[in-house]
Amino acid sequence: MKKGISSFLFQALTSAESAGVSGILQDLDPRMKLISCLALVILVSLVHNILLLAGVVLICLILSIVSRVRLRAYAARVWIPALIFGGLVSLPAAVNIFVPGEPLLVLWRFSGPVVLGPLHIQEEIAVTHQGMLSLLTLFLRVAATLSVVILVSMTTKWQDALRALQDMGASRPFILMLAITFRYIFLFVNLIENRNLALRSRSLVEHKRRPGRAMPAAASAGALLKKYIEKSEQLHDAMVSRGFHGL
Amino acid sequence: MQWFPVVSMVFDLKNVSFSYPGGRPGLASVSLEVSDGERVAILGPNGSGKSTLLKVMDGLLFPESGSMLFRGAPITKQILSNRKFNRSFRKSVGLVFQDPDVQLFTSSVREEVAFGPVQLELPDEEVAARVNNALAFLNIQGLGDRSPFQLSAGEKKKVAIASVLAVNPDVLLLDEPTADLDPRSVWEIVDVFEKLHMEKKTIVVSTLDLHVLPELADRVYVLDEGRTIRGSGPTKDILSDLELLHEANIIHMHKHGHDHTGHVHL
């Protein structure tokens, strides 16, 4: 097995290891998984009930355990983006500066109302009940959506997913484009990886800020773009050679 | 509809010249002929225009001057824009690229091999049969459900050949098929060539590998660094013409010796 960024990315995107083992979700028909996934994502985006959202997250966690999915990888893919996009980004909504509401926890008290440009801050800055509720809802919604999508992606082989899409009526050009895009991500990550290694193998001293360091990076980006165009042209030629005449 | 008459001359190139955009030369007045069922090699150093020549023969690039006939029919951009003619030509001629990565892009080997037959709009059963036959021909039935990403260089090359064979062309163009392969894979590919030859396929192969040349071709055209044909003849004669090979930069001569093909002692 190849080592390196491309290999890591391949594992991360295809979940080749966890999708290859035998488990409850792995043994399910990929079409059923895709349809269920779509239905659950729509459901999660419509409901506002925190308990229901938490239930989806919990069920996904249990399913990941019984399907022998690597928990660490699963948790990293679900909880890190959920914390960033559902937690940190919406954190300001929890305080009464942006969303007024019933104070739950006072963080700072002023002697009187404060006006900062367009912001009219009341006598105190506090975490509100309503703010916490919306923060928690958003966070759980993101976590539940990610849980469903990541769980399905980690228990379904990439080629099975594409085949399922085809069986479900997705157009052939769409699937072809998806397959080509997916394949070429790896080819180019591999190319970048090798280029980077070649650059490092010729770097005699480690000077992170040495003058002219930007030059190889710029030249490398230019060469990569050229290579990308060249490969794309060759790919097109290879398709035309086998009778392809446009999507 | 039969577009191409059954004539013994498969390719007839006359004074074909080609330049890439920006003026980079590709081919300079190349003339060659390939007959039905022949095994012909294009031998030349790096950058001599071998890949360009094969692309011209596959109707992917078009000569700036000179002419190319395929079974007596001129091949031009305008003629190939006719969908029915194009389809007939693509069914007859298949090109295996040097870098299999540009050829393999689907999510599984089976789908990759099916790409050509699907483009020919064959019925599903026929597509499946052709895929199975091509995989069996290359002895890679076990790779069918694998992703091309996970294959070794030798396996990728075999899948690339299978993906072209599934179209069942009469003429096969192969760009350096043994390049970058380990010895076992090289000889497995050579065996495939032998089987194709037994099936009366016309084979044009580009190479700079003198070790396997006698196994790949009966006749050789030598391209030099001027991107033109410097010589041609039966493989045995070409391999014994050290002066020609040296002038074309296919072998080099030096005073200390190694007992390998491609090195000649003075």
Image: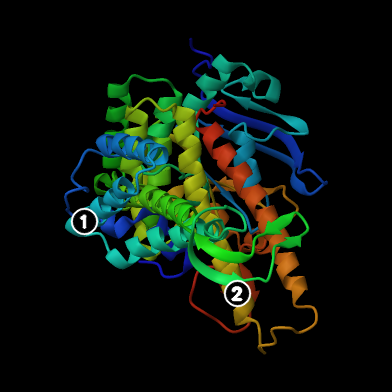
- The image shows residue A217 at horizontal and vertical percentages of 71, 69
- Residue bearing mark 1: A62
The quadrant of the image that shows the C terminus of chain A is top right
Work out how far the residue at label 1 is from the one at label 2, CA to CA, in angstroms: 45 Å
Judged left or right of residue A27, residue B225 is right
- The image shows residue B164 at horizontal and vertical percentages of 43, 37
Query: Would residue B19 be seen by someone viewing this image from the given angle?
Result: yes
Q: Earlier in the sequence, mark 1 or mark 2?
A: 1
Chain hosting mark 1: A
Marks 1, 2: nearer the viewer: 1
Q: Which residue is drawn at 37% across and 25% down?
A: A169
Q: Which of A245 and B241 is in front in this view?
A: A245
Query: Would residue B50 be seen by someone viewing this image from the given angle?
Result: no
Q: Is mark 2 on a helix, strand or loop?
A: helix
Q: Nearer the viewer, residue B238 or B191?
A: B191
Q: Of the numbered discs in the image, which one, if any, rests on residue A198?
A: 2
